Amino acid sequence: MIVIIMKNGLESLLWDMCIDPSMKPKIRRLSETYLEQLFGLDDQLMTPELMIKAYTFYTGHLVKTHFCSWKDIAIPRTSEDDILAKKMEKATKYDNFRLQKYIFCHWHSYVKDQKEQLKDTLLRIQQIFQCNRLIIILTKWRDKARLKCQERENYLILKHELQLKKWRNRIKYKRAAEEQLISPKQSLSGDSSVSEIYECDISLLPERAVLQIFFYLSLRDVVICGQVCHSWMSMTQNSLLWNYIDFSTVKNVGMDKYIVSTLQRWRLNVLRLNFHGCLLRWKTLRSVSLCKNLQELNVSDCTTLTDESMRYISECCPGVLNLNLSNTTITNRTMRLLPRHFHNLQILSLAYCRKFTDKGLQYLSLGNGCHKLIYLDLSGCTQISVQGFRNIASSCTGIMHLTINDMPTLTDSCLKALVEKCHRITSVVFIGAPHISDLAFKALSACNLSKIRFEGNKRITDACFKFIDKHYPNISHIYMVNCKGITDGSLKSLSPLKQLSVLNLANCVRIGDVGLKQFLDGPASTRMRELNLSNCIQLGDASIMKLSDCCPNLNYLNLRNCEYLTDLGIEYIVNIFSLISLDLSGTDISNEGLAILSRHRKLKELSLSECYKITNAGIQAFCKGSQILEHLDVSYCSQLSDEFITTVAIYCLNLTSLSIAGCSKITDSAMEMLSAKCHYLHILDISGCVLLTDQIFEDLQRGCKQLRILKMQNCRLISKEAAKKMSSIVQQQEYSPNEPPPMMEKASL
């Protein structure tokens, strides 16, 4: 065994290697467990690896035990007092650190707050400095602006006085020349204050500019211009000038021969003819057939027009696109000619033609028919029945614009019969059709309407606006005038319409602030351009306050007879910077409101009729800031006098329309100043100005040479002879020498 051990080494040494096998002890097998019975294990579980692990554990345990005992003997134990002292020292240091940290945080916050306060103080000082600097600058600017404004006012007043002086001197010398006291040449050279007369040769202007000038003249004026000289005659012979001939301006003069010669001369150039209200002979009407290129013909109110005349015209003028036969005596014979010859007819007006029948409308489908017709006016044709509307629907399916006014026989059934085949209708006008109800809107739901106009209908209620909201999302114009059944609920239904730009609800007396507020809250208000709420007497300042914020594009605003509107509402109206036309007639506005309104500076039209609180001071404050004003209505403002006219003459030189009806304090001197300065005046209403005399006509003829319409009702000091003489100068005149009615006199007092 020793030899084996030496040969194999100590690694193979076993403890019982040298014992005789017979003497070896009987060791109980470790694997003699239930596992052996279960799994049948025969090998010995005590392996060398397990023995090594057991030995290592035992040795390590002994080392650990003896090392701990040695450490306890070799290292003396520290006392508990020392440990406590060390802990107290650490605690003291930690407490001191926390205290320092707390104090530092407070100090840091204090320093930070001080820096912020210092920064805010410096910023506040800078703001105060800038504010004071701006105040100084604005004060100097304001003083300078006031000085400039005062200088400008003084200049305008001085200029006004000089012009008035020149005006009076010119009239004085002309009167003296007429009386043959001095010659006109001496009169003009005798006073240096009379302005020089500058001559301008119009023939030197470009042809395009000359045409634009002559386009604004009437036929009578063009003929007169052609008689001035040879150069002017050549200018009036331009063929483009005779594309449109309006004979209605000379209808009171026997012009049959001139009309025939004119049409014969310019027959190839004439495209549009207007014979409105002309009493022409049969041969004269027949001469229209010479104009082969005619496209537009207006023979409305021509009582001499017959079916035979229309036969000649239709046979020779097949290119007519626009035909106006309103208020004539045509019959079914003419209706038969329309589809036979006018194949391209697009616009047809048969208003107040009561001699054709339903059968005449049936003729419209004959031949090529009037299938290109897009506009049809049947106003006042009360003879048309439901069958007539069916005939129209069968022959004119392309109608887009339909106008039926003054037709009490029009019912929902008529519209239903028309809409069955005419699905392209985009605009309808029904004024004076009292039997139309909400069912008409239901019938029109098949069309994509963009414009609706009703007036004087009591059967329309809020239900129709629900149809508008659901079926007409692209509607842009709504006119519902004098419809008593409309309430605030209608405005609420209109608020979602995004394309709505024009809304007219005049005389809808049941509309109030609640409905207008609901309307302004919707998207419809953003595109609104025109808003007419006249005679909506329940409206006040509460709803007007939202207009400036919700209607940034509003151009025209009518609040006539809104009695609850005061100067407070004017403060918000001023913020609508896009506004150019405003009607405040019959409201409670005063001079303070006009002073506020003068800040707008962009108004061109203002109506203040029956505003009894307004005086000369209010008009003066407004006119100083509204020098682009073109239309002014101060009728029945009884406190106004000549001083108001002086202010208008100084600042509002571009005035084209003025109404001072019922202003009983206006005298001839005021009209003299107006004539001397306002040379662009076209319309003038002086009805009820009881102090005016015939002297005003001379001033108006000399100064207001563009005057076209003159109203002089209840002017008792104006003679009939002077008024008759003036009627030959203006295009339209209204005159009566009667006393003013009692209500007018009461208003003036």
Image (cartoon, rainbow, N blue to C red):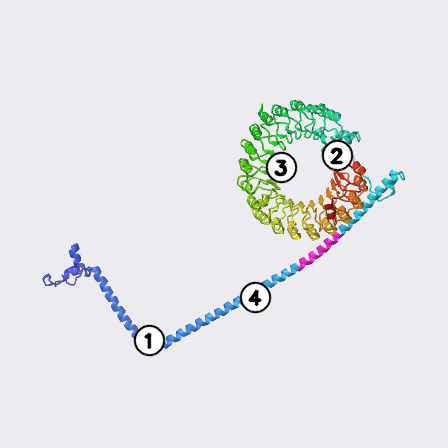
SS category of the residue bearing label 1:
loop
Query: Which residue was labeled with disc 1?
Result: 77
Query: Which residue was labeled with disc 3?
Result: 432
In terms of sequence position, does the residue under pointer 2 or pointer 4 come before the other?
4
Determine whether, in the image, residue 191 is placed left or right of residue 257: right
SS category of the residue bearing label 2:
loop
Front-most of residues 66 and 404: 404
In terms of sequence position, does the residue under pointer 3 or pointer 4 come before the other?
4
Instruction: Report the Cα–Cα distance between label 2 and label 4.
Output: 78 Å
Tag nearer the camera, 4 or 1: 4
Question: Is most of the magenta stretch helix, strand or loop?
Answer: helix
Query: Which residue was labeled with disc 4?
Result: 114
Front-most of residues 459 and 182: 459
Which residue reaches farthest left? 22
Q: Are marks 3 and 2 in contact (CB under 8 Å)?
A: no
Instruction: Report the Cα–Cα distance between label 4 and label 1.
Output: 56 Å
SS category of the residue bearing label 3:
loop
Tag nearer the camera, 2 or 4: 2
Tag nearer the camera, 1 or 3: 3
Query: Which residue was labeled with disc 2?
Result: 205
Numbered range of the magenta stretch? 132-150
Instruction: Report the Cα–Cα distance between label 1 and label 2.
Output: 127 Å
Specify the amino acid type for callout 3: Gly
> Based on the displayed image, in which of its 4 quarters is residue 380 positioned?
top right
